[in-house]
Amino acid sequence: MPAAPRRTRRRTHALLASAATLATAAALTAALPADAHESHHRPGRYQDVQLLSFNDLHGNLEPPSGSSGRVTELQPDGTTKTIDAGGVEYLATHLRQARKGHPYSVTAAGGDLVGASPLLSGLFHDEPTVEALNKLDLDVTSVGNHEFDEGARELARLQNGGCHPTDGCYTDTEFQGADFPYLAANVQDEKTGKPILKPYWVWKKKDVRIGFIGVTLEGTPGIVSADGVKGLTFKDETETINKYAKVLQRQGVQSIVALIHEGGYPASGSYNYDCDSPGAGDGISGPIVDIAKNVTPAVDALVTGHTHQAYVCTVPDPSGRPRMVTSASSFGRLYTDTTLTYDRRTGDIARTAVKSANHVVTRDVPKAADMTDLISRWNTLAAPIGNRPIGYISADVNNTGTESPMGDLIADAQLAHGRELDPRTSLALMNPGGVRAGLTYAAKGAEGDGVVTYAEGFTVQPFSNTVNLQDFTGAQLVQVLKEQVSGVNAAAPKILQPSAGLTYTLDLTKSGADRVVTDSIRLNGAPVDPAATYRVATNSFLAGGGDGFPTLGQGTNDLVGSDDLSALEKYLTANSSAENPITPPKADRITVVS
């Protein structure tokens, strides 16, 4: 049977009148290079290109709940307010409205568009999200670490289409795959040394050409299960971008944007904070700063992600010229609108004219009917599984803070599951990055307030990790706690969420491993004995030494239990009822000194 024909791309906004092309040019002439003012006499030399971008959607098709569905906005008087944001029905409307009057418009993303997704997308291996991104008219994206959650073969299926190898087709039509290219310039096949997907892609409109290079963070293998990255090599982000920038230039492409699934941390949690106010680059820290400072000046802008932060900053390139570095938070709550002024004479971007801003995906605009239809179709398939109650809570169980109530609840559930497998189990530890959301008391659907549904549990723990038991010495256990704040986690600590009974002090006024106060560590009130053996429950990702915890990969006497979501479900069902809901843990097991 011949393969089904690929769908052709429908781009209604591309048919807008070309008379609008100069609409914003006048507004930017003041910022253009000195000779750019000649554009008044030579209309057409400069062409404004609109670059719309977002990152870290994580399959959030429906509006995210709780703090995951809000952004903080800085007010003129210095106060802040929160705004409900996100949901692809609204994202589609915002992007379509933003494109009006901009016939030269390209939409790009910075990775993690799928993976760690809510049930509506995750249950179907993220096919619903790829379908939504096609309808959003996404042009290009880099891969992120979560695109490797199910391995390179599944990523190739998301790109090229075809039914899932074990779950088959979910509807009567075969999954078509992404209409946009996934770029993976620094992800190579171990045997061939070649990128597993396209390293770059060139957007063309008439005589305007802009190249896009896509990379994910070099450290992806440390934050993805070993199976997901088997047979792959992840190269240095900066070296890879610089290499392919030369390739593009040799092809005559002078305007280049890097899509980088790596990010930074702004000095403020408000999306509209003036990142450059203290001085160029001072408003942002983290891995992206070094990358931005070393990526070749041939690259004109950096669209970033991974840290789920919001920023629009300039960081000087190696030649000392400011260059735009942006990130649009996560979960579809923001999008970035950047104006790149293309110089037809040089084929390059007039860098001094680059303007950029983050915009909130507010929910006060009409919903996009095609997205409502998409969500409805997939919800019909997911509802019988997702709407099943699995427990009851008395209040919101948040996943924010150094130690979070949600993290503690998961650790308690894994300890309970561990003790069912082996009564000797002493404690459980949960990685904070695996706690993808909290649980909200207010009903999301018709289930009623305080009811936890399977879909809500899936949103919290979507990875299908198993709960693993391992034996460690007390000395190793102390070392694990120190690895939270030392080694690869020294700059950005990863504080493991502890089960009830494990307590200690974290002194953030100190540095490195000293931040864990060793003589404060207690298990059920007793000091940890360095020579004793402790049975520890973790998820399979941590048990393999993931997230920078090599000592957790050295446990002995392994025993593999059920998946982590089943453990949480069983714990909630056993310990809560409509009449007696579970109370959120107080998150007071770690005493933080700051």
Image (cartoon, helix red, strand yellow):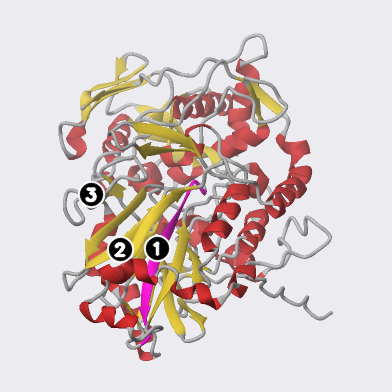
Q: Which residues are drawn in magenta? A: 332-344
Quadrant of the rendering where the N terminus is positioned:
bottom right
Q: Secondary structure at mark 2?
A: strand
Between discs 1 and 2, the one toward the N terminus: 2
For label 3, count other residues whose C-alpha is less than 10 Å away and answer few (under 14), some (14-19) or many (20+).
Answer: many
| Vertical order, 487 against 131 (above or below) | above
| Vertical order, 460 against 9 (above or below) | above
Amino acid type of disc 3? Gly
Q: What residue is shown with label 2?
A: 324
Amino acid type of disc 2? Met
Residue 488 inside the magenta-drawn segment = no
Drawn side of residue 222 relative to residue 519, left or right: right
* Res 256 → quadrant: bottom left
- Report how far apart the C-alphas of labels 1 and 3 lie in the structure: 19 Å
Label annotation for residue 338: 1
- Say whether marks 1 and 2 touch (CB < 8 Å): yes
For label 1, count other residues whose C-alpha is less than 10 Å away and answer few (under 14), some (14-19) or many (20+).
Answer: many
- Report how far apart the C-alphas of labels 1 and 2 lie in the structure: 9 Å
- Report how far apart the C-alphas of labels 3 and 2 lie in the structure: 13 Å
Q: Main secondary structure of the magenta part?
A: strand
Task: Give the percent coordinates (x, y) of residue 461.
Answer: 55, 38
Task: Give the percent coordinates (x, y) of residue 334.
Answer: 46, 49
Quadrant of the rendering where the C terminus is positioned:
top left
Label annotation for residue 535: none
Q: Secondary structure at mark 1?
A: strand
Q: Nearer the viewer, residue 530 or 216?
A: 216
Task: Give the percent coordinates (x, y) of residue 515.
Answer: 20, 32
| One can see residue 506 in this view | yes
| Disc nearest the viewer among 1 and 3 | 1
Q: What residue is shown with label 3?
A: 283
Between discs 1 and 3, the one toward the N terminus: 3
Q: Secondary structure at mark 3?
A: loop
